[in-house]
C-alpha cells in the first residue's frame, strides 16, 4: 500500500517563471548561445543539454522557447522526437529482417510504431505535420537515410 494521497506523484517544477538570482546569463545572452549552437548543427535537445551542463542554465524554455520551437524540426520537416523514434523503428526493422523469430523485438516494434502513429496524429492536429500524414516504414527508411 502506498502512502501517497490524492493521486499526486513526484515533484513539480516551480510555477514562477523568473530568472534565479544565481543565474549568470540573461535572456538575450541565452538566445545568442542558442542561435550559435543551432548554427553549429546541434538539435534542440542537444542545445538544452549543453546549456544545462556547460552554462548552468537550468531550463531553456524560460529563455528561448520560440527559438527552439523553430529549430525543433529536422531538415526533412518531421519533429525531432518523432524523427528519433523513426530511426529506432528502422533499426528494429533491420534487426527483424535478420532475426525473423525474435518475438520480443516484434512486440517492441509494434509498440514503437504505435507510438509514432499517435505522435503523428498529435502533430497533424497541431499543424506541425500535414493533416493527411500517415506513418509508413518505407517512407521512414527514406527519411532516415
Image: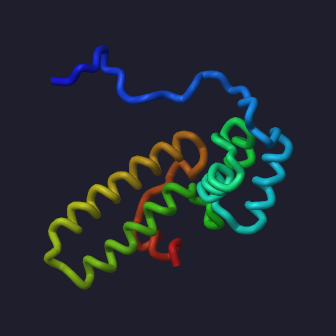
Q: Nearer the viewer, residue 60 or 88?
A: 60
Residue depicted at 79% across the width and 41% down the height: 24
Q: Nearer the viewer, residue 110 or 45?
A: 45
**48 left or right, relative to 140:** right
Q: Nearer the viewer, residue 29 or 106?
A: 29
Residue depicted at 57% across the width and 59% down the height: 78
Residue depicted at 70% across the width and 36% down the height: 62
Q: Nearer the viewer, residue 5 or 67?
A: 5
| Image coordinates for residue 135, horizontal then vertical, percent | 42, 60
Is residue 60 positioned above or below 18 on the image? below
Q: Give the farthest residue toward the bottom.
A: 98
Q: Residue 141: in sight, yes or no?
A: yes
| Position of the N terminus by quadrant | top left
Residue 15 falls in image quadrant: top right
| Image coordinates for residue 11, horizontal then vertical, percent | 44, 28
Q: Give the farthest residue toward the top.
A: 6
**2 left or right, relative to 64:** left
| Image coordinates for residue 13, horizontal then vertical, percent | 54, 29
Is residue 10 positioned above or below 8 on the image? below
**26 left or right, relative to 102:** right
Residue depicted at 45% across the width and 69% down the height: 87
Residue 49 falls in image quadrant: bottom right
**66 left or right, relative to 110:** right
Amino acid at each position: 500500500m502506498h502512502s501517497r494521497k490524492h493521486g499526486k506523484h513526484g515533484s513539480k517544477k516551480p510555477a514562477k517563471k523568473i530568472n534565479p538570482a544565481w543565474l549568470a546569463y540573461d535572456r538575450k545572452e541565452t538566445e545568442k548561445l542558442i542561435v550559435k549552437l543551432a548554427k553549429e548543427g546541434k538539435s534542440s535537445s542537444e542545445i538544452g543539454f549543453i546549456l544545462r551542463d556547460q552554462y548552468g542554465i537550468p531550463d531553456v524554455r524560460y529563455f528561448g522557447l520560440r527559438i527552439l520551437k523553430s529549430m525543433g524540426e529536422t531538415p526533412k520537416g518531421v519533429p525531432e522526437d518523432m524523427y528519433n523514434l523513426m530511426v529506432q523503428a528502422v533499426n528494429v526493422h533491420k534487426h527483424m529482417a535478420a532475426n525473423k523469430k525474435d518475438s520480443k523485438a516484434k512486440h517492441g516494434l509494434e509498440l514503437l510504431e504505435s507510438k509514432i502513429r499517435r505522435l503523428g496524429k498529435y502533430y497533424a492536429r497541431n499543424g506541425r505535420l500535414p493533416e493527411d500524414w500517415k506513418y509508413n516504414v518505407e517512407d521512414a527508411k527514406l527519411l532516415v537515410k
